Image (spheres, rainbow, N blue to C red):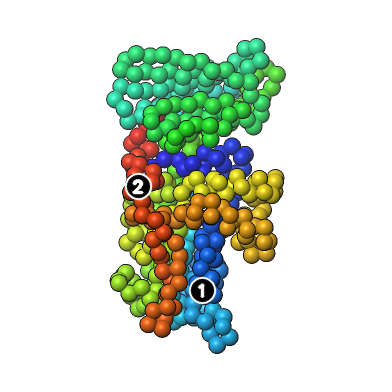
Amino acid sequence: MYLSDIFKFTQGLGQKGHQIGRKVGDAIELLTLGMIHFDSELTKFLVIEDGVEGATTAKHKVEFSFYNLNTASAASKRSEDLFGIIECKKVGVEQTIKANFKKWKANSGNNRDFHLTNGYTFSISPNVAGLRWGIKISGEVNEDNNLRVDLTTTHNGISQTKLSRFNCTANQQILIATDLNNQIHVLGPEQKLSEVEGHILKCIVVIIKRVSEAGIIEIHVNESLPGPQTPEKAKQASFVSLDVRKKVLGRFDKTEDQSFISVVVIGEASHWETKSRSMVRLCNDYNLFIPDPVLVYLFEQFEQKFGITYQDKITKTAYKNDPNVKALVIDILNHFARKVLSDMATGNFMTFGYERENDKNRLRIVTLEVVETLPDELSSPEIQLDEQITEE
């Protein structure tokens, strides 16, 4: 597990997590809808955001569902006519107050302006024998700078300290990130996380809350956690599949019968640990994910096309009503030669298709390209942060 490249891109946008998270979810839905629309026959049976009924009588909000047509040539929306569902799920990065900063702040000796304290110190020990980083953040007035970061790297008993100074204003931030290659990066207020090459394992966010002429008055320190709600999302997706399959086919378990299939399309797959992946694989017929670079590219292209309010265009409503939005989504998919849906089991690129079999309509998941090497999201070793990183 590592922090997604989507987080690397969106972290510098200055938006709250739930706001940008919702837009990432919308982007996943747009790309999925675009892939569906490449098959004009399949599109005839499509219902968007339908309340699909399960055996429990619960109505499940499913992004895309497919029904046989009624006498008016419209999707019937009857359970006996349902032959496929596609859910879209993602779990982003959660930023929460760093535990030992909370303890530091509660210390009575630190109940004063930050630049008057002895500074805030913590350490990071990656899963490499003999390697340890010590970080001290302190407020000081040195020429035009008011914040100091001392980074001490200790490797096999030998220590070296690197000093960084920054001039920070209120609401700016300092980022301290480690990557999967066991490198550490200290980024100043004018830098972005996306400047770091490779995948980010951990990111500490130091937010400058209040500043005066005398120095920094208050800071806040958060740590970024990859997808802590992933197990809950996996349970939701699995239950919907089981409940609806029971209603349609009369059984919970998967079989060779493909008259009804359930599909989950996942974003930020690097946040999905083994247990959550196993859960959705057990319960859903197909589990696909959209690689991070595709989603980042979508954000970049929408901003280039629509300007500062581009995120307002990343919705299914805009896709339906604005031909420019639909055209851009199709252009993005074609930019990647439609290879945007990767099978979580194999890494192969898949696409949606329609088939008429035994006089019945069928949703099919068709292999677009077989890959020889698993993508990073599937091949990277699973690293649990509470095991990989120890702090003081």
Is residue 339 shown above or below 102?
below
Amino acid identity at mark 1? Glu
Q: Residue at x 30, y 71 (%)?
A: 255
Image quadrant for the N terminus? top left
Q: Residue at x 46, y 22 (%)?
A: 135
x, y percentage for residue 58? 47, 72
- Residue placed farthest to the top in the image? 143
Q: Which residue corresponds to mark 1?
A: 41
| Depth order, front residue of 102/24 | 24
x, y percentage for residue 174? 56, 28
Q: Taking the image as drawn, is residue 199 in sight?
A: yes
> In the displayed structure, does residue 130 sit left or right of residue 187?
left
Image quadrant for the C terminus? top left
Q: Which residue corresponds to mark 2?
A: 374
- Residue placed farthest to the bottom in the image? 71
Is residue 43 shown above or below 312?
below
Give SS at disc 2: loop
Q: Which mark is residue 382?
A: none
Q: Nearer the viewer, mark 2 or mark 1?
A: 1
> In the displayed structure, does residue 336 sit left or right of residue 288?
right
x, y percentage for residue 284? 37, 64
Q: Quadrant of residue 216?
A: top right
Q: Residue at x 62, y 18 (%)?
A: 146
Crowd tier of the residue under label 2, counting other residues whose Cα lies within 10 Å: few below 14, some 14–19, many 20 or above = some
